Amino acid sequence: MRGKGRLNQNAGIISCAASLFAIAAGLLFGLLLLYLFNSPYAYSGFIKILTSGLANTERFGKVLYQSAPLLMTGLAVSFAFKTGLFNIGATGQYTIGAFFSLTAAISFQLPWWAALIMAMVGGAVWGAIPGLFKAYFNVNEVITSIMFNWIGLYAVNLIITNMPVMLDNAWRTGGTRDRTAMLKHANLDALIPKLGLDELLGTNYVNIGIFVAILLALITWVILQKTTFGYELKACGYNRSAGEYAGVNSRRNIVLSMMISGALAGAGGGIYYLSGTAQYTLVKNLLPMGFNGIPVALLANSHPLGTIFSSLFISVVQVGGEALQPEFSREIIDIIIAAIIYLSAFSLLMRTMLAKLFSGRKKQVADDFGAEPAQEENA
């Protein structure tokens, strides 16, 4: 089994190197943009992007606050990738999860943990629909999930518009114009508890949402790596025909995979909007959090534990970008952050290229792996 271990080790090294190269490419592109837009402050601005999110406890608290929903949407995309599906509908499931959690909190006065469960239920239901189309009609899940992003957005806006208890004069949920008191006016128990983290870090943003997200990431890893159910999901994703030949119910697993992925994205919406520092605004644009989960998943090579670190990195970049004002305008900052995030998504391409470069070494490892069982048998 020594050859197999070396093969897995090489694959891990290639995956890590690809992610690091992708991050470096994105950061260098951002530095180039800074020089083009405002060269005297380019280097100092670049340093701010990398360090401002960790410069003090207040900003670090905001990093944790922003990374929690980002981790959940990245985890949703990663789970679908691992089971052979491309869930590009995480933003719709995130929106439905946010709506379910806010409805449970404001209209039904449920505590935060019950509202968070409702968020996962909403995301699971919305994720199941593309899964059903894929499983029973062989409709590509990318097409249906994109369509249901928009359907979910407009459905939520329409329903909230006809729920006076969810609206205020600023067209935001919560019954108050104060953005920092979204649920305080409606239901104090619906706020995700801070457990003293706000006093420790000196910011009102942080709560235990990041620990809930990390716990869900650990549970997801256990399901995929340590359970028969997870093995069946991955087997079906790698080769549906082979899975069916082995007795795996592929249709059921496709639907379940999309439901679990949707539940994770929905939990992200719940964590974000139950924080007490964010309000759902009726807009006609898709929420970007679901799409930002795609580069999180790609940077982590779809590994549930890797998404924890990739989401933290992207959150650090986002908080660091906010510190560039007033030297740089907000629009330039958005372009730089978008370039860094989305160039990071090329880690998959870089991983393929690095794998080809090391194909000779991998062939040598494969030869060693094939020779060792015979030696053990002779022994």
Image (tube, grey):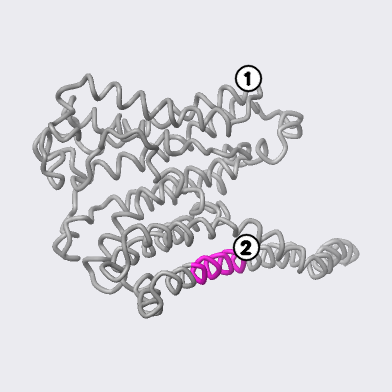
Residue at horizontal 26 percent and vertical 41 percent from the top: 273
Q: Is residue 359 magenta?
A: no
Q: Are marks 2 and 1 in contact (CB under 8 Å)?
A: no
**Left or right: where 248 falls relative to 57:** right
Dot 2 crowding, Cα within 10 Å, few <14, some 14–19, many 20+: many
- Residue 184 occupies which quadrant of the picture? top left
Please check the rendered image and state whether residue 22 is part of the magenta-colored stretch, yes or no. yes
Q: Residue 76: percent from the left, percent from the top?
A: 47, 42
Residue 136 is tagged as 1
- Residue 328, image x and y in percent? 32, 67
With respect to residue 185, does 130 lie above or below? above
Residue drawn at x 72%, y 68% is 6
Q: Nearer the viewer, residue 74 or 162?
A: 162
Q: CA distance from mark 2 to mark 1?
A: 34 Å
- At 40% from the left edge and 79% from the top edge, which residue is drawn? 43
**Magenta-colored segment: predominant secondary structure:** helix
Q: Amino acid at mark 1?
A: Tyr
In the image, residue 265 sits, relative to residue 358, either above or below, namely above
Q: Who's the residue at 76% across and 68% down the image?
A: 357
In the image, 13: left or right of 79?
right
Name the residue that disc number 2 marks. Answer: 15
Mark positioned earlier in the residue sequence (2 or 1): 2
- Image coordinates of residue 170 in percent, x first then y, are 16, 35
Percent x, y for residue 100?
30, 29
Q: Is residue 122 left or right of residue 30?
A: left
- The range drawn in magenta is 15-29
Q: Could you say which is closer to the camera, residue 174 or residue 261?
A: 174
Depth order, front residue of 196/353: 353
The C terminus: image quadrant: bottom right
Q: Crowding near pointer 1: few (<14 within 10 Å), some, many (20+)?
A: few
Q: Regarding mark 1 in the picture, which secondary structure is present there?
A: helix
